[in-house]
Amino acid sequence: MTEWFRRKTDKIKTFDKRDTERGQWQKCPSCSEVLYYKTLENNNFICTVCNHHFRISSKNYFKLLFDSDENIEIGKEIYSIDHLNFEGIKKYSDQIEAAKIKTKLSDAITVKYGKINNVDTVICVMDFSFIGGSMGSVVGEKIFRAIDHANSNKLPLFIITSSGGARMQEGVYSLMQLAKISTKLAQFSENGGLYIVLLTDPSTGGITASFGMQGDIILAEPNALIGFAGARVIKQTIGEDLPEGFQTSEFLLEKGFIDHIINRNELKETLCNLYSSFGYLNKVSDNE
């Protein structure tokens, strides 16, 4: 009987629910469109209807940007330690182990260097899926080493942020990273280094008080949440109503806090254009 009601035209196809694998479809949180996962993946996880940029992993960003898989990881051997024997709802040491298993990452940031359009580049990518992309001593140390490598080899530095702020389970060790990274970036700048940052959703807390807003060029993905404190905290502090969407990348672009909003599909091309403007493509040609 059910076959009488199944559509068989070329343009309209139906299927049984049992024929679909779990996770093949994804609902867009912005427009509620149901998207086929493979289509979404092929479009770098950007909604084909409303242009909403889904959060993606560091692995996806590296795949998007590097010319090949022939790149080298910096600081792979560094792991977080529970210096304070912190215990909340969960032990901090247990949180770390659970995050490692869940994400298959060593911490909330991965640093690699490789080629983007044949230009050697150091890339740091934060990953929100690892304890909210929080910045602890390992994140600070990895970025520190990334800056060192870029500085020593005269390479551009590119950092992609995605974080809820400092990792308070590490107390002052976490807060120290802001000054540590900022000081190293100042040295990098004095030596003529090029630092580009991409703010993704969300980029909040300590990173916006430090390296997130210290780039020579500050890019952001569309409609990314960017800010230091949450809207509720700010409203309670100043006792005033806040402008609608005041922590979106679009609002910050209008106010001059960021330089450009970039579609993820155009990111690699945009970086190449910037490298050309700052003479890095010419350096490659001279070496060759």
Image (cartoon, grey):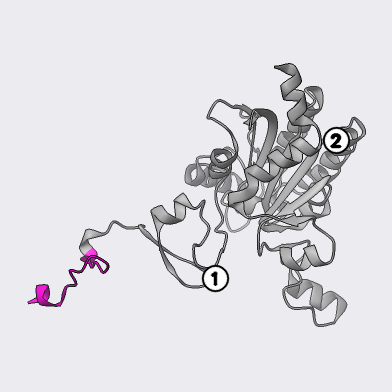
Is 6 magenta? The answer is yes
Quarter of the rendering occupied by the N terminus = bottom left
Distance of mark 2 from mark 1, alpha carbons? 38 Å
Q: Is residue 185 magenta?
A: no
Marks 2 and 1 close (CB-CB < 8 Å): no
Graded by Cα atoms within 10 Å as few (under 14), some (14 to 19) or many (20 or more), the crowding at tag 1 reads: few
Q: Is residue 283 left or right of residue 112?
A: right
Of the pair 272 and 33, the residue shown nearer to us = 272
Looking at this view, is 30 or 229 the one in front?
30
For the residue labelled by badge 1, is the local secondary structure a helix, a strand or a loop? loop
Q: In front: mark 2 or mark 1?
A: 1
Residue extending farthest top: 288
Residue 234 rendering spot, x and y as whole percentages? 80, 72
Asked if one can make out residue 84 in the rendered structure from this viewpoint, the answer is no
Relative to 21, 224 lies left or right: right
For the question of whether residue 278 can be seen, the reply is yes
Crowd class of label 2 (few under 14; some 14 to 19; many from 20; radius 10 Å):
some
Earlier-in-chain disc, 2 versus 1: 1
* Amino acid type, label 2: Lys
Quadrant (top left, top right, bottom left, bottom right) of the C terminus: top right
Which secondary structure dominates the residues rendered in magenta?
Answer: loop
How many badges with numbers are in the image?
Answer: 2
State which region is magenta.
1-17
Q: Secondary structure at mark 2?
A: helix
Amino acid at pointer 1: Ser
Q: Which residue is mark 2?
A: 184
Could you say where residue 83 lies in the image, as x and y percent from the top left?
70, 40
* Residue 175 drawn at (x, y percent): 80, 48
Residue of label 1: 30
